[in-house]
Amino acid sequence: MLEQFHFILSKISSLQVSILFLLGLALLGGTIGGRLLERMRVPQVVGFIIVGMLIGKTGLKIVAGSTLQALEPLNYFALGLIGFTIGGELKKQVLTKYGRQFLSILLAEGLFAFLLAGTLIAIATKLLTGDTHLAWSLGLILGAIASATAPAATTDVLWQYKTRGPLTTTVLGIVALDDGLSLLLFAVASSIGLRLIGDTSTGAMVSFFDPVYEIGGSILIGALSGFVLSRYLRRCHEEERILASSIAAVLLVLGIALIFKVDVLMASMSLGVIITNHNPRKSKEIFRLFARFTPPIYVLFFVLFGAKLDLTHMTLPLLLLAAAYFVGRTAGKMLGARFGARLSGAPKGVQRYLPMCLFSQAGVAIGLSILAGQRFPSEVGNVIVVVISATTFVVQIIGPLSTKWAVIRSGEVGLNVTEDDLIRRTKVEEIMDRDVPLIGENVALSEVLTTLGESRNLYYPVVDGEGHLLGIITIDNLRDTFMAANLQSLLLAHDLMEPTTAVATPDMSISEARDLLETHGLEYLPVVSKKGKVSGLLELRRMKRYISRRVLELQKQAESLT
Amino acid sequence: MGLRGSTDSSLMCILQTRSKEQVLLELIELICRTGRVHSAEDLTQSIFYREKLMSTGIGLGIAVPHVRIEEISHPITAIGISHDGIPDYESIDDELVRIVIMIVAGKNQHKEYIRLLAEIVTRLKDDGVIERLCAARNPDEIHEILIGSSDA
């Protein structure tokens, strides 16, 4: 017994097994955590991250650092998918309509966050250490990192609550573009910062061209791949091939971006932008397919993200610095977003609620902090890494909550609903026709015809004395009797009805009902309660009309917000 | 198809009994002898259930019990003549029923079924057909009157 236990333990400690275990654990735990928090009305992404922290470096340390290291490619994959999907939202119409607005908001929120966070950090450092050079260089670096806004957690909230409208579009646009801005700021800031603390080994010129190379390179890689994929997709028609080749494209773009050391997020985003604009019809299909298989990858991504967050090196001075960073960045984002939105004449809803949507910080910020940690002497580098880790933890919890609050207040929640969502969510009883005339089986043809004259239905359920369904009379059935006027007294509803091949129940979803209709080749389904009594009728044509009308209504509602 | 295709003289008889129940059973038996009905019990039940909903005695001495059942591939018509009349058939005009025409069709043969019913009712409305049927003495005569000579 004990031996077997040891045997299993020894197996678990091998990397492959532990990775599989970890993936399973992370997915299961994340899903449960997300669900629990969702019940508490907190966006699921917060739950994923907390579960990650519980099992990760800050918490129980179930996950070895080497395992997290080994799973790094998965994080890139998730980031690539997120970038690709966000890129897909940046259609030509959106960019021409919102381009100016995006740019002024982006510059304002990025620069304000940079200035405020940087100043506060500088002041706090000066007060804590008295070292002016250190104060300015830390202020510059952390300020530059503060300008970044992470797309992942924010978009997860938007997707979870199915939002649509000007606020949603603006948030997506901003989080998509501000990577570029923060890379630029960081490059400038770090080269100046390094000089300030007396390190002149890296030339300013090299440093300045780094971000230009990084941004330009990522866009080039993404865009070129986008054209190739778009070309190739013209010849793909089966879902499987479209899905497989799109995933392949994302993976290849990520790989190439990593080889050339350019920004993976921007590369995959460029891929998405090109696809959505170059091949709009196919891309709609791609993003629909992606939406189905990406959720577990995102769960893993956020859980692993939480697991990597290391808050164990916290000290009081560092906590103060983190607080200064948090306050400065938050205030800067809010003021900047507000200012930029007003300046560009953005819709009222955007002006009012966008400031609450830009708090999230993750991959890029952490990546830059680690980069800074490598470039700067270790005492400075460590400060940067710890401050960013700690504040990332806080904003990743506050960010989704405030984004949720904002999108709810803006009235954009639930407007981004596809036909599929509606079909799955709507129950038969919500759209069935309740006022169907029921016909007793012993009713004579003449009376059936009278009932028919008085209503506009095409189908009439035939019931026994207790209201139980026996069959259906359709207009088609009755057409046959027109040539038999002399049978009026001979034919009853019982003789005219067709047997029912399938029935729906009131609490069935429309998607189930639609499957029934399809398999039986029917135009209608009688709806029968648990006791076998007829409670209504579901007609295919009415169902279709309802769904397309509802989708249109939601679309109009979203448009009316602009 | 139609009436001619759904019957022949083996499905016709001079009724031996006088009660509605017995008469219906006689005709059911004729139909079952064709071997095309799988369950005589089901057929019997369906026929009697339908009569309970409303009598198929449509007046002028005619009754047309009819039913659709699952396994039939095309309609079967059986015809019985009662010389004494069936007093308990509950015809709508309270007359004695003398001609009983039983139609059994498949569940999905809605159109054929209605057509057959219509054809029979129309045929019976022809001058003198009812009187001649009531006077018929054997299956061949019934066949002759309703459809024409067997070899036609």
Image (spheres, rainbow, N blue to C red):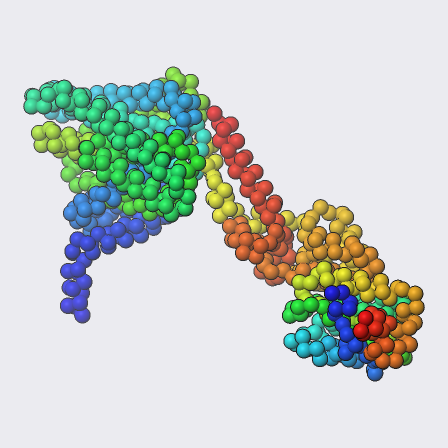
Image height check: is A551 above or below B2?
above
Image height check: is A288 above or below A356?
below
Residue found at x 22% / y 23%: A212
Q: Is residue A441 visible?
A: no
| Residue placed most toward the observer, B141 or A200 | B141
Residue found at x 82% / y 56%: A485
Furthest residue to the top? A343
- Looking at the image, residue A508 sits to the left or right of residue A197; the answer is right
Furthest residue to the front? B151
| Residue placed most toward the observer, A154 or B92 | B92
| Residue placed most toward the observer, A248 or A373 | A248
| Residue placed most toward the observer, A260 or B133 | B133
Q: How many marks?
A: 0
Residue found at x 73% / y 76%: B31
Residue found at x 34% / y 49%: A31
Task: Choose top left, top right, bottom left or bottom right for residue A299.
Answer: top left
Q: Is residue A88 visible?
A: yes
* Residue A186 image point, x, y percent: 20, 25
* Residue A267 image point, x, y percent: 27, 32
* Residue A527 image point, x, y percent: 61, 55
- Looking at the image, residue A530 sits to the left or right of residue A50; the answer is right
Question: Which quadrant would the N terminus of chain A be assigned to in this image?
Answer: bottom left
Task: Choose top left, top right, bottom left or bottom right for residue A336.
Answer: top left
- Looking at the image, residue B79 sits to the left or right of residue A253; the answer is right
Image height check: is A442 above or below A367?
below
* Residue B11 image point, x, y percent: 77, 76
